[in-house]
Image (spheres, rainbow, N blue to C red):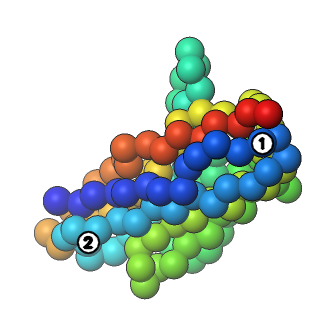
Amino acid sequence: QVQLVESGGGLVQPGGSLRLSCAASGRIFRTYTMGWYRQAPGKQREFVATITSGGSTDYTDSVKGRFTISRDNAKNTVYLQMNSLKFEDMAVYYCNANVETLTRTTINYWGQGTQVTVSS
């Protein structure tokens, strides 16, 4: 079994910053692409950013220049630094990871989500 545990969400004013973390644990042989998605009330879950095991990154256009995704492969942890937050960034943020387990099966996992609230 593999678990993804997110942390770092909270309440922030517009223009503020938050840093999300997501640690993968369990029967992990290797983690591949890790990323962040978000879901606002009444909307579908959407892509935010991903990072490969080699460090290549991709972002949705609305967060480019404001968010930075990074990872620590030794800790199986992915981060999302969010700066210049806007009202429209408010959502539940979900961590996602492709994990090769000890049985050498690659499975896609989701975290439980962490709430990001942007309010003045």
- Helix, strand, or loop for circle 1? loop
Q: Residue at x 75, y 55 (%)?
A: 17
Does residue 48 appear to the left or right of 31 in the view shown? right
In the rendered view, would you say 42 is above or below 70? above
Corner quadrant of residue 100: bottom left
| x then y, percent, for residue 2 | 24, 60
The answer to which of 65 and 114 lies nearer the viewer is 114
Residue denoted by label 2: 28
Q: Residue at x 54, y 56 (%)?
A: 8
Q: Find the distance from the CA under tag 2 to the CA under tag 1.
A: 37 Å
Camera sees residue 85: yes
- Helix, strand, or loop for circle 2? strand
Which corner quadrant holds the N terminus? bottom left
Camera sees residue 58: no
Residue denoted by label 1: 13
Does residue 36 appear to the left or right of 25 in the view shown? right
Q: Amino acid at mark 1?
A: Gln
Corner quadrant of residue 14: top right
Total count of labels: 2
Q: Amino acid at mark 2?
A: Ile
The answer to which of 91 and 56 lies nearer the viewer is 91
Q: Of discs 2 and 1, which sits in the foreground?
A: 1
The answer to which of 30 and 70 lies nearer the viewer is 70
Corner quadrant of residue 55: bottom right
Does residue 118 appear to the left or right of 99 in the view shown? right
Label 1 CA crowd tier, 10 Å (few <14, some 14–19, many 20+): some
| x then y, percent, for residue 79 | 57, 64
